[in-house]
Structures are given as structure tokens and as C-alpha cells.
Image (cartoon, rainbow, N blue to C red):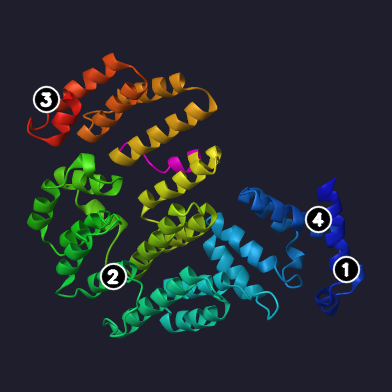
């Protein structure tokens, strides 16, 4: 009843809107459009973006006459991974009254960046500053993207540094990597070994990628050999495995420092991760889809999107994203299985979840020590001690008796 009343009030207000009356006569207005538009807003606020997009599409006649329509439509398109379509809609429907939001000009700037039109990208980006207001992270995004564009145009590191701490340092590392700067190794090493609360081990993968791209296989292998599967992220573990199995060509198939889109994509993944850590999953998904638009080859970043949907209890979309990972992606395939098991636990019960993960673990040929350790812990936590001990015994036979892990398992 309350929703129906609210719809009615909105319709009355909309009929009285001078903005609308300037564009069309009231007789041309179909109240059903506004009803669908309102339903889209409700679905969007409830994080049901797929449904929201359907409602927005069915009320698209409002795009040039209703102040907030283009913004809501754009955000929904990007959240559905339709970034190119969002850019086209903005370009074709931009008016003085409906484009006063930061994301419109950001999307247009990135659309031009992807087409290597850096001048046009800078023009759109400059217009975005007007709508940043007091959003500090939007300012960081605009300033950082502007710095990247300057590097691409001038082929040199700007003497003017952004003052955003390690956030700026991360981007300078990738800019130097792009420029093939002689100090790139030093910058990567300093970043990975940063002594603060943040975890920068992810960048070990990109350092390995850089070394391999520059034909420094032996150095990459030495670094990889010293990495510990149990204390490495999914991405780093996957990279280590590729080097061990001599599948190093897989690195350049998903990322290259010499590719403009790839390195800016990694910047937006960083933004997405930051929003996710703040539990702002909608913003995180927005920027993650921007990242994927720029570099769709980097499927592994979709694991963050799966996590976000899972935390939002959108299990159907979580499962859809997990389809991106297959058995060839050993560590991400294991991530997929564990996430599916978690969903089974929430939807059914813990016993069925454990049965699922144990059954699928047995189908994996030559699982790594990281995966065996996971399955051992899962059984231990479920008080299936007999199964857990069996797996811990496998681990003990493969590790150094003087290691910390050996002591943890025994005691």
C-alpha cells in the first residue's frame, strides 16, 4: 500500500515538473513509464540490478526529460557489465539537465581511452571534476587517471606526484613498467616489501609477469621457487604453478605492462577492492566491471565479483560468475568449489556442503599442498578428524620437518 501511495505522489510531482513540460505536452506522458522507473529504483536499491535494468529499459522514454534517469540507467548498465552500451547511451542522450554526475564523464573518458583517443579522454575527465563534490575517492580516481593519460601521451613519468600514499606508489610502479623504466625492478621490490598494514603480495604476480615479458625467465623462476603456496594469494599461487609447469605464456595472455588498457584496468581493480573492503559492494562491482571492460582477458579478477555477490546473498549471480573458472585454473577452480560449498551450506546444511567439497576434491588430480591443507582444515572444523588426519599426513610427507607448518599440524 505504501509503495502504491509513493508511486502516486511521484506521478503527481512529475506532472507538475517544469522540466518535463518544457520538453513535451502532458498529454504525451504515460504514467506507466514513471511507474516502471520507480520500480527500477526500488529494485536497484534492493541490489536486484538485473530487475532494475529491465524496468529502466521499459521507461526509457524518460531518458532526456527526467533529471536522474540517465544516471540510474548508466549505473545499472555498468553493474550488468554493459559498459560499452552505457557509454553509447550517455553519448546519444547527454543534455545539460541529465548528465551532472561523475560516472557519466568517467565512462566517456574510459571509452575514449580504450580507443586510444587520449586527448578526448582528457577532455571528458576534466568535465568530471565538476561533479566530484566532496567524494575524496572520486578525486583520487580522476587525478590518477589524468596522470596515466599524461604518461601515455608524453611517454614519461610526471614530475608532479599525486599525494595519495602507497595508492599513488602502486600506480607509479605500473607507469614505470609501461615505460620500461630501468628502475622498474626496484619499484616492484619496494612495493612488495612495503612495511605497513596493507597486503601488497598480489603484485608479486605482476612482477613475475614483468620479468617474463622481458625474457628474464631464470630470475622469475628463482623468485617463484621462494614463494610459499600456503602463504600466497590465489593469483600468486596460480602464477607460481604456471612457472613450475612451464606454462609461462599464460601470463601475457591475461596481462601486459605494455598494454594501456591492462594497466588502467588493474588500477580500477584496486579501487574495486578498496570499496569491497568497506563493504560497499555496489560501488565495488561498478568499478570491477569497469576493470573487466578495459581488460576482459583477466578472468581471475572476477573472483572478487563472486565474493561481493556472495556477501550480498545473491547466490544465483555468484554461481554464474563462478562458471568463469575451470579445471585448468587449478587454484581458481578450487576457489569455485569452496564457494559453491559455502552456498550449499547456507541453502541446505553443513553436512551436504562437506560431502560436496570432499567428493569434488577427490576428482582433482595431483592437488597442490595448498588445496590439501584446505580440505584437511575443512574436515577438522567439521569434526571429521579421521579424514582430516589423513590429509594432514599427506602434507607432513611433503614438507620440511623444521617448518612452522609442520609444528602447527603436530601441535
User: In terms of secondary structure, where does tag 3 sit?
Assistant: loop
Reading the image, the residue beneath label 4 is 35
In this rendered view, identify the residue nearer to me: 288 or 62: 288
Can residue 363 be seen here?
Answer: no
Of pointers 3 and 1, the one earlier in the residue sequence: 1
Q: Start and end of the magenta stretch? A: 319-328
**Contact check, label 4 and label 3, Cβ < 8 Å:** no
Label whose residue precedes the other's in the sequence (4 or 3): 4
What's the CA distance linking mark 1 and mark 4? 13 Å
- Compared with residue 234, is residue 41 higher up or lower down, i.e. above or below? below
- N-terminal of the pair, mark 3 or mark 2, is 2
Which residue is depicted at the point 29% across and 48% down?
A: 235
Q: Which label is found at residue 169?
A: 2
Q: CA distance from mark 2 to mark 4?
A: 48 Å
Q: Secondary structure at mark 2?
A: helix
Q: Residue furthest top?
A: 386
> Residue 244 falls in which quadrant of the image?
top left
Query: CA gap, disc 4 to disc 3?
Result: 66 Å
Q: Residues within 10 Å of mark 1 (few under 14, many from 20)?
A: some
Say what secondary structure mark 1 lies in: helix
Relative horizontal placement of residue 262, taking residue 72 as reference (left or right) = left
Among numbered discs 2 and 4, the one appearing first in the sequence: 4
Say few, some or many: other residues with alpha carbon within 10 Å of mark 4 (under 14 / 14 to 19 / 20 or more): many
Disc 2 from disc 1: Cα separation: 52 Å
Give me the residue at 28% from left, 70% from top. 169
Q: Which residue is mark 1?
A: 15
The CA span between labels 3 and 1 is 76 Å
Task: Confirm whether residue 230 shows in the render.
Answer: yes
Amino acid at each position: 500500500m505504501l509503495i502504491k501511495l509513493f508511486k502516486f505522489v511521484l506521478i503527481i510531482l512529475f506532472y507538475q515538473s517544469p522540466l518535463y513540460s518544457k520538453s513535451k505536452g502532458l498529454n504525451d506522458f504515460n504514467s506507466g513509464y514513471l511507474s516502471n522507473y520507480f520500480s527500477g529504483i526500488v529494485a536497484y536499491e534492493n541490489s536486484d540490478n538485473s530487475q532494475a535494468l529491465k524496468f529502466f529499459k521499459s521507461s526509457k522514454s524518460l531518458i532526456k526529460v527526467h533529471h536522474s534517469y540517465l544516471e540510474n540507467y548508466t549505473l545499472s548498465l555498468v553493474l550488468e557489465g554493459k559498459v560499452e552500451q552505457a557509454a553509447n547511451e550517455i553519448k546519444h542522450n547527454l543534455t545539460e539537465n541529465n548528465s551532472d554526475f561523475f560516472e557519466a564523464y568517467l565512462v566517456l573518458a574510459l571509452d575514449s581511452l580504450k580507443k586510444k583517443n587520449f586527448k578526448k579522454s582528457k577532455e571528458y575527465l576534466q568535465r568530471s571534476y565538476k561533479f566530484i563534490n566532496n567524494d575524496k575517492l572520486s578525486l583520487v580516481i580522476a587525478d590518477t587517471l589524468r596522470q596515466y593519460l599524461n604518461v601515455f601521451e608524453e611517454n614519461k613519468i610526471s614530475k608532479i606526484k599525486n599525494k595519495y600514499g602507497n595508492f599513488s606508489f602502486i600506480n607509479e610502479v605500473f607507469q614505470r613498467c609501461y615505460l620500461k623504466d630501468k628502475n622498474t625492478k626496484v619499484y616492484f621490490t619496494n612495493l612488495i616489501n612495503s612495511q605497513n598494514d596493507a597486503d601488497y603480495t598480489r603484485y608479486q604476480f605482476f612482477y613475475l609477469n614483468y620479468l617474463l615479458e622481458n625474457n628474464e625467465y631464470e630470475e622469475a623462476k628463482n623468485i617463484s621457487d621462494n614463494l610459499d603456496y600456503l602463504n600466497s594469494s590465489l593469483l600468486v599461487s596460480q602464477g607460481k604453478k604456471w612457472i613450475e609447469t612451464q606454462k609461462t605464456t599464460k601470463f601475457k595472455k591475461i596481462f601486459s605492462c605494455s598494454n594501456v588498457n591492462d594497466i588502467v584496468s588493474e588500477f580500477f581493480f584496486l579501487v574495486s577492492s578498496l570499496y569491497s573492503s568497506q563493504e560497499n559492494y555496489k560501488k565495488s562491482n561498478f568499478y570491477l566491471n569497469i576493470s573487466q571492460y578495459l581488460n576482459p582477458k583477466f578472468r581471475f579478477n572476477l573472483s572478487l565479483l563472486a565474493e561481493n555477490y556472495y556477501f550480498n546473498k545473491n547466490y544465483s549471480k555468484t554461481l554464474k560468475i563462478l562458471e568463469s573458472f575451470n579445471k585448468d585454473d587449478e587454484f581458481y577452480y578450487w576457489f569455485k568449489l569452496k564457494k559453491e560449498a559455502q552456498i550449499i551450506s547456507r541453502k541446505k546444511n553443513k553436512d551436504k556442503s562437506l560431502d560436496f567439497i570432499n567428493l569434488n576434491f577427490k576428482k582433482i588430480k595431483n592437488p597442490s599442498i595448498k588445496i590439501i591443507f584446505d580440505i584437511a582444515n575443512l574436515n577438522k572444523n567439521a569434526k571429521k578428524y579421521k579424514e582430516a588426519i589423513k590429509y594432514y599426513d599427506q602434507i607432513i610427507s611433503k614438507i620440511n620437518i623444521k617448518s612452522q607448518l609442520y609444528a602447527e599440524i603436530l601441535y
